Image (cartoon, grey):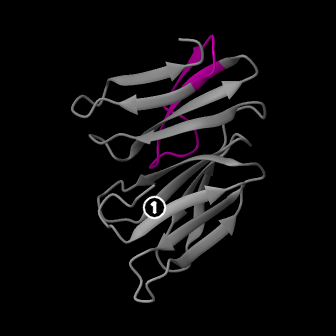
């Protein structure tokens, strides 16, 4: 994912490793700014998260069922882990609300079922809302102007 306000930064993942690249570096080659492995399984989705518009945060969602919030300033470290999902629930998608950038939605898969959970990074102890679905949720997205409208894409639907 490209940084939302800088053409120089690109976040990517391979397996359980999260990497931040500076592709605008003076060396004319991508420079690894940050690399970390904190998830126990593959990182499936990443999303930039700027709750007040100035922070440099990144969300990562993994097949291990956890979501991590990374602070990319200074030491570049995981500052929060959200994991109120069951061990079988895999994170398939994460989308930050454009209208309310402190909120994000997660699409989950568990066996042949799924769920959507909505979180607030200011209150990471538990999700705000969780909706069970009959099939895995592979995609979620917020309406750009109405913060209460959330769409989902499910397997076979």
Instruction: Give the image location of residue 102, x and y in percent.
Output: 38, 47
Instruction: Give the image location of residue 42, x and y in percent.
Output: 72, 49
Q: Report the front residue among 15 and 76.
A: 15
Identify the residue at horizontal 42%, vertical 69% (top origin): 9
Please, what secondary structure does the residue beneath circle 1 have? strand
Q: Quadrant of residue 52?
A: bottom left
Q: Report the front residue among 129 and 93.
A: 93
Circle 1 residue:
57
When the figure is inspected, residue 151 is found, relative to residue 17, above or below; the finding is above
When the figure is inspected, residue 156 is found, relative to residue 45, above or below; the finding is above
Query: Left or right: where does residue 83 sit relative to residue 1?
Result: right
Query: Left or right: where does residue 41 sit relative to residue 9?
Result: right
When the figure is inspected, residue 62 is found, relative to residue 11, above or below; the finding is above
Instruction: Give the image location of residue 47, x and y in percent.
Output: 47, 50
When the figure is inspected, residue 3 is found, relative to residue 120, above or below; the finding is below
Q: Report the front residue among 129 and 95.
A: 95
Identify the residue at horizontal 33%, vertical 57% (top origin): 4
Identify the residue at horizontal 63%, vertical 14% (top origin): 135
Boundaries of the magenta span: 114-137
Queried whether the magenta region covers residue 81, the answer comes back as no
Queried whether the magenta region covers residue 126, the answer comes back as yes
Identify the residue at horizontal 50%, vertical 40% (top origin): 94
Q: Residue furthest bottom?
A: 27
Q: Residues within 10 Å of mark 1 (few under 14, many from 20)?
A: some
């Amino acid at each position: 994912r490209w940084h939302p306000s800088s053409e120089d930064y690109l976040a990517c993942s391979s397996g359980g490793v999260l990497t931040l690249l500076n592709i605008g570096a003076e060396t004319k080659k991508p420079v690894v700014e940050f690399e970390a492995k904190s998830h126990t399984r593959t990182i499936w989705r990443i999303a930039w998260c700027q709750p007040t518009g100035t922070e440099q945060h990144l969300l990562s969602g993994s097949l291990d069922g956890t979501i991590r919030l990374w602070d990319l300033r200074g030491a570049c470290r995981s500052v929060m882990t959200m994991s109120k999902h069951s061990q079988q629930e895999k994170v398939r998608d994460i989308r930050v609300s454009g209208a309310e950038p402190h909120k994000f939605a997660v699409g989950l898969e568990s066996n042949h079922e799924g769920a959507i959970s909505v979180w607030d990074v200011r209150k990471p102890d538990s999700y705000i809302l969780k909706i069970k679905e009959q099939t895995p949720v592979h995609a979620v997205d917020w309406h750009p102007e109405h913060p209460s409208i959330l769409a989902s894409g499910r397997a076979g639907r």
